[in-house]
Every structure is written in structure tokens, then in C-alpha cells.
Amino acid sequence: MPSNPQSCTTPRQLFTVLAAGAIVLLVVHGLGRFIYTPLLPYLVEDGQFSAGDGAAVATWNYLGYLMGALLAIRWYRIDQIRTLLPVSLAVHVLTTLLVTQTDNLTLISASRWFNGVANGMVFVHAPALILEWLVLRNRASMSGLVYIGVGLGLLVSSGLVTGSSELLAGAQRWWPAAVLSIPLAWWGAARLMQLDLPVRPQNHPGHAADTTPLLDRASIPLFLSYAGAGLGYILPMTFLPLLATLELPANHWMLDGTWLIVALCTIPAPWIWNKLGAKLGDLPALKLNFLIQLLGVLAAVLWPGAIGLVLCAALVGSTFLGTVLLTQRIGRALHPHQGPRLSAAMVALYGFTQMVGPWLTKQWLDMGGTLGSAFGIGVAALGFGLVFVFFVPLAGDWHGRSSL
């Protein structure tokens, strides 16, 4: 390891590392998780399964995501990440290929569960690995840029689904995602495995990375706010295109346009919230982020139809990644010695609440409720999260009090 890695790091190296992280998130999130959102109306129309069964499939995927994040809490060391990251990407590719071959609901659900496990592990391991690499080079403020890959993944998934909608049907609709995942996963994994990092996480003086608690008076309200965020955003990110098919006439441009708006608004979001966090402070920026996101989901409830759909797509698309990067940075500032373990715990909690969202939606639909009214669950969840953000202390105040 160089004695001064900051002085030895070139802009090209920084770009390559951030690009590799963005690419693997594009693969597992854009081509794994969120491509299911624009695919869902087509799969229901093709008769592969009902809307209720589609919600159940989404729940299995989110359950897998939760399990993957929980595994990442157990296996969080650098040497373990080096092994598990390429394995997880390989699982993503194999499970995506599997769903191109079957219309069996049980096999689809199982495949999406395994795909979720891989997604959860990569979503923890790749950004955590990159953040530790950046911290050693005094570039931690750039860490949020890796999430641009999620926004690009949404745009790519929208293009793949819309572009192939007239050519493919049923299980065949997964082929574009499967084919594109192979070279991208290989390139991203190859670059990240070359990162020069110490095998053991670095500890700050006076801290022990493996013995200090994850939960205390500073982190508990942050975890609770993050739980509200996970439940609040997942409803539009799973069901917005399906809601459009229920509220708009046939052949309306918004049937595919809602997901395109989400994608376009998501791409610059990490850069915007990185800047706002630097200018306002991460904690004030997070409060603003929650408020905007809440208004977006509320718009879909108050104004059914094109206006509500556009507002929901734009406001949620431009904020949900900001919630992730700001919360992760606040958490690390409160507990700088925890590193990847803290990130894994947050993603696990986020994954649990995301799993609950589609399950609650399915119960609501089975009881005769409408999909539009189910978005009220998201409004309540984001309101819950916003309240608890106000109980999170500033990192400087917390460490000052803790040292007394």
C-alpha cells in the first residue's frame, strides 16, 4: 500500500473505480431489480401471472435482497468482499437467464429470490468497498457518485423493455437484460477486484471495529428514518407503470413514460444530493429530501391520472438515491469505525421495509382496495421517516458529547 495513496491517485483511476461501481449497480439494480417494474404490466398482459401474483414475485425478490444484506453484515471484511462480489454477480446472470426459460410461477419466484440475494450483497459490498478506497485517498465526498449507475440502470431498463415490447412476449422479455448483464458484470467485477486496500478495515484511534454497537442513541433514529424511506419509495418504484395502465387510456404516452421520467430524474440525482449535502450539510439535506419524496408519492394519491403520475415519477426519481447516499454518509460520520458493517445493516433494514411494501399492497388489493389508494401506505411511511430525521444528531455534536 503506498504511504500516501491520495498523492498517487490519478483522476483516471478515480473515474475507473467509480465507473466500475456504477456499472455493477446498473447490472444488479437496473437489469436485475428495477427492470421488473416496467416489465410487470407486459407480463400481466401476456398472461404470465396476475397483478397480485406479480406483487408476490416482487416480494420474493425483496426478501432475497434483505437476506443478501444480512449476509453482508456477516461477511463484510475486504477479503470476503473480494470473493463474494464476483460470485454474487455470477448468480445475478444465471438467475436472469433462468427466468427467460420458464413461465412457472414457483420457478420465477425462486429465481427472483436468488437474484435478490445477489443484488443485496452487491449493493452493500460494491459501494462499501469503493467508500473505503476513497476514504484512504481523502475522496469520501465522491462516494455518492457510484449511485449514478442505478439511474443509468433505470434508463437502460426502460429502453430495453420499451424497445423490445413488440418483439418479445412472456419469459422472452427477460432476454435483453440477461444478454447485457454478462459483459457489464464481468468488466465491473474485474476492475473492483483490483482495488488496493488493506484486508482488515482500518480503525480510528480508540475504536474497535468489531466490538462497538451498531445501535445507540445516534443511530437508532437514523435507522428508523431509513426504514420509513424504504417502505415509502418502493411502492411507486414497483407499481408506477402498472398504476399508469389502470388510470390512463390505452396508447397514452405515459404508459411507458412514467418509468422513463423516473430514470431521467434519477441519473443526475446522486450528483445533486452530493452537492446539496456539501452545501447544506448531509442532515439538513436529508430532511429536504424526505419532504420532496413525500410530496411525490402524495401527488399520486391526490391527483389520479397523468398529473399525479408525472409528479410522482419526477419527485421520487430525483430523491430516492439521495436518501441512500446521504443516510449512508451520515451513518458513517456517526460511526466512522464501522465501515461496511454499518452499510450492510442499513441496507438490510431498507430491504426489509421494501419487502413489506409489495406484501402490504397485495393484501390491500386482495381486500378490494385500489392500487392508487395503496400509495397512501408510502405517504405514511415517508412521514414517519421524516419525523425521525429530526432526532438524528449532528456527527460533531455526537462525538463531542461522547468524548466528555
Image (tube, helix red, strand yellow):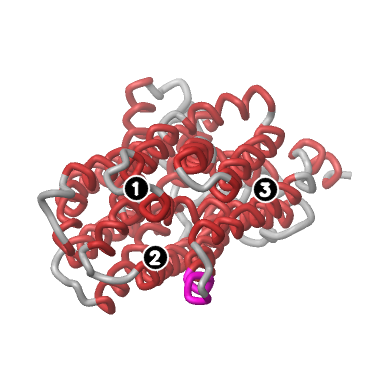
Instruction: State which region is magenta.
Output: 362-367
Sequence-wise, which precedes: disc 1 or disc 3? 1
Q: Is residue 225 magenta?
A: no
Q: Which residue is tagged 1?
A: 249
Q: CA distance from mark 1 to mark 3?
A: 51 Å
Check disc 2 and give the amino acid type: Ala
Could you say which is closer to the camera, residue 306 or residue 226? 306
Check disc 1 and give the amino acid type: Pro
Q: Residue at x 64, y 42 (%)?
A: 290
Quarter of the figure with residue 394: top right
Observer-side mark, 1 or 2, equals: 1
Helix, strand or loop under label 1: loop
Residue 335 image label: 3
Q: Residue at x 63, y 52 (%)?
A: 379
Structural crowding at the residue carrying mark 3, measured as other residues with C-alpha within 10 Å and reported as few (<14), some (14–19) or many (≥20): many
Q: Which residue is tagged 2?
A: 58
Q: CA distance from mark 1 to mark 2?
A: 25 Å
Q: Residue at x 31, y 59 (%)?
A: 40
Image check: 113 left or right of 373?
Answer: left
Structural crowding at the residue carrying mark 1, measured as other residues with C-alpha within 10 Å and reported as few (<14), some (14–19) or many (≥20): few
Q: Position of residue 109 (x, y in %)?
A: 31, 73
Q: Position of residue 3 (x, y in %)?
A: 47, 29
Asked whether residue 52 appears in the rendered view, the answer is yes
Q: Quadrant of the N terminus?
A: top left
Q: Check contact, mark 1 vs mark 3: CB within 8 A.
A: no
Q: Quadrant of the C terminus?
A: top right
Sequence-wise, which precedes: disc 1 or disc 2? 2
